[in-house]
Amino acid sequence: MIFSTKAEYGVRVMVELARRGGEQPVALTEIADHEGLPLAYLEHLVARLRRAGLVESRRGAHGGYLLTRDPARITMAAVVEALEGQIAPIECFAATPDSSIHCVRAGDPERVCTSKLLWSRVREAIVQTLEETTLAELVPGPAPTLPTLTPITSTPKKAVAA
C-alpha cells in the first residue's frame, strides 16, 4: 500500500506541532516554511485533523494550531485514518458502516477471494504498527540508549571441576 502525500505531510505537521511543545499556537505558515510544504495543501490537511479532534485552531494575530492532547496519547492510526480514511491495502477491501473492513467478493460464492488471507494480514500488520506508534515517538530527541549485548560464542565452554 502506498500512502499519499496526505499521510506524509499530515504526519509531518503533527510532529512539528508536537516538537513545538504545545504551549502556544503554531501558525501554519511557520510549519509550511520549516518543512518546505505547500501552505494551501496543509490548510486542507489540518481541516481534516481538526474534524478528527486531533488539533484545534486559535484565531487572531497570535493564532495557529495546537494538539488537542499529549503526543503520547495520539496514535499514528488516528492520524493516518483522519487523513486517508480507512486503511485498505487493495481496492476490493471496503469499509462497512460500522468501520470494519471486508472483501467485496465475500458475498459471492462463485468468486472466492483466494488472496483474502494475505491482504487481511497485511492490513492487520499496518494497522497494528500505526496503533502502536505514538506521535511522541516521532518527535526528534536524544537517541535512545540501547542495552549492551553480550556476543554469543560458538565454542562451548569447558566444564570446571568443583
Image (tube, rainbow, N blue to C red):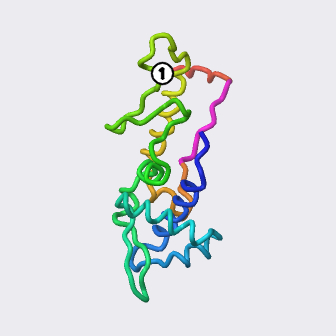
Determine whether, in the image, residue 7 is placed left or right of residue 101.
right
Which element is circle 1 on? loop
Q: Quadrant of the N terminus?
A: top right
Residue that sits furthest to the top in the current view: 110
Q: Label 1 neighbourhood size at 10 Å, few (<14), some (14-19), many (20+)? A: some
Residue under the point 63% across and 36% down: 151
Is the residue 117 above or below the residue 122 in the image?
above
Residue under the point 62% across and 76% down: 33
Residue that sits furthest to the left in the current view: 98
* Count of numbered circles in the view: 1
Residue under the point 54% across and 35% down: 89
**Magenta-colored span:** 147-154
Q: Which secondary structure type mostly characterizes the magenta part of the structure?
A: loop
- Name the spot of residue 68 as percent of width and height, x first: 34, 66
Whether residue 151 appears in magenta in the rendering, the answer is yes
> Viewer-proximal residue, 91 or 87?
91
Is the residue 43 above or below the residue 136 in the image?
below
- Name the spot of residue 14 as percent of width and height, x first: 48, 63
- Name the spot of residue 34 as percent of width and height, x first: 61, 74
- Name the spot of residue 69 as percent of width and height, x first: 34, 64
Whether residue 22 appears in magenta in the rendering, the answer is no
Kind of residue at badge 1: Arg
Residue that sits furthest to the bottom in the current view: 61
> Viewer-proximal residue, 52 or 16?
52
Q: Which residue is mark 1?
A: 105
Residue that sits furthest to the right in the current view: 155
Is the residue 12 above or below the residue 85 in the image?
below
